Structures are given as C-alpha cells and as structure tokens.
Amino acid sequence: MTEVKNADPRRKADEQLPLAFSHDAASGRDDLLVSEKLAAAVAIVDAWPQWPSPVVILAGPVGSGKSHLANIWREHSGAITIHPKAGANAAVDAANGHVLFEDVDRVGFDDTELFHVINSVRENGNSLLMTSRLWPMSWPVQLADLRSRLKAATVVEIGEPDEELLSQVIVKLFADRQLYIDDRLVLYIVNRMERSLNAAQTIVERLDRLALSRGTKISRSLVAEVLNELGNSDSFD
C-alpha cells in the first residue's frame, strides 16, 4: 500500500529538482488545531478585547503554538510588534495602539522600558500580548515596580503537545504540501519524534525535500532515515 500519495500530479515534473520550495502553511484562526493543552490559550486570544487584564502572557515550551496564537491575535487586533529596549520608543507605540512582544525570555528587555510599555497600555486602554518559554516570575527582573506590574498580568500556560495534536499537525503539514500521508506512517513518526510542533515542521520539511531530491515516495524507511538524522530514536523497531 502506498504510504504517501501525491495530490498534485504536477509534482512529477519537480521530483528531480532539490529546491527549497516555499510552502505557505495555513496559519489563520480557522486552521488552528486545538488540543486540551492549547485550549486555555486559544480561549484567551478569542476573548479579546474582553480580557481580564490589559496584559496577557502566553507561557509554554518551544514549538507549543505560542507564535501561531500571537500571529492570530496580531492580525485580529492590528497590534504592532515591539522590543522594549532602551531607546526603542516601545512605550510610545504602546500608547498609540495594541502591541505584541514575542520571545520575552529569549530576546530580553529593558526593565524601565517594559514598565513604561505596560503603563502605556493601561493608561490608554490598549492591550499587550507577550510570549515566553518561562513564567514571568523566572524573568531576570530587577525593577520592583515592573515585578508588581507583571504580577497583575494574566498568565496562560501552554503544555507540550500530546500525541493526538502532533498527529493532526503532521497531517496538516503534509496537506499544506499537497501530500496525503497514511495513518500508520503518522503514528510511526509521532512515536519517535521530539514532542514539539517545531520538530514536526522540521521533519515534514526534510522528508518532502529529500523525497523530491531523490525522486522517491515518502516511505517508512525514508522516515526512519530522517528521524535518525535529526537525532530521534528509532529503537522501537
């Protein structure tokens, strides 16, 4: 039985070209795959502008869906992306409209500027959405007033994706490439991969490009090769 079928026969002409084709993944609200781990974060994004506080923080591991949700909120709210650092005038942007600050714990911030950003959104009736791998209590905050402001923020935790969500994501990622994958092959991947949405995207992209460059279908043996290449265990065979 063929494990992966090409939905578009035109791919035949492209199979010998190992190019980095651009695949536009559907990333709107209607394309969001909602699992139990993601439900609370989806609910808070959908509830805007009726938020319990002007500042909302989505906290979760890499690849848990924070960026997808942040993009949905940014498009819906018309927010602009900011980086609260000295001289960036982020507080001015926050006074003029809704703002988004992603990867807080990774890119860092200036305590005073972030404090002024939060004050600006509070005073002008705007909203601030922040994303982070860590809860704000773990951020390296020195300014006592900023710590106080962060305690008043609404923090929503996103857990690691479960097997059901990862399976749905993998199917969707292949569908974005006009490929349909056998359920057994999906299960084979999920049982052996890192539990993150980023890992799912990396695996699917690598499989698609490798199959195109070799002119082959995506088979179990090709999946095993890619998983091993990416450092995922294949010891379940």
Image: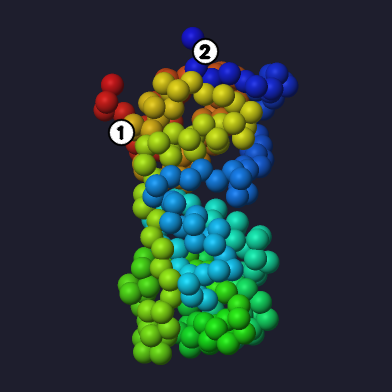
Q: Cα distance, mark 2 to mark 1?
A: 24 Å
Q: Name the residue: 58% across, 87% down.
A: 123
Q: Which label sits in the foreground, 2 or 1?
A: 2
Q: Residue at label 1?
A: 233
Q: Is residue 107 left or right of residue 215?
A: left
Q: Position of residue 214 (x, y in %)?
A: 57, 22
* Residue 153 seen in this snapshot: yes
**Secondary structure of the residue carrying numbered label 1:** loop
Q: Is residue 26 left or right of residue 205?
A: right
Q: Is residue 104 above or below residue 145?
A: above
Q: Name the residue: 65% across, 80% down.
A: 93
Q: Which mark is residue 5?
A: none
Instruction: Give, as a three-letter code, the residue at label 1.
Output: Ser
Q: Is residue 9 above or below residue 178?
A: above
Q: Position of residue 125 (x, y in %)?
A: 60, 81
Please identify the quarter of the rendering in which residue 228 is found.
Answer: top left
Q: Is residue 178 left or right of residue 107?
A: right
Instruction: Give, as a three-letter code, the residue at label 2.
Output: Thr
Q: Is residue 56 above or below residue 183?
A: below
Disc tally is 2
Please identify the quarter of the rendering in which residue 76 is found.
Answer: bottom right
Q: State the quadrant of the C terminus.
A: top left
Q: Position of residue 27 (x, y in %)?
A: 61, 47
* Residue 103 seen in this snapshot: no
**Secondary structure of the residue carrying numbered label 2:** loop
Q: Name the residue: 40% across, 36% down.
A: 164
Q: Residue at label 2?
A: 2
Mark 2 vs 1, N-terminal side: 2
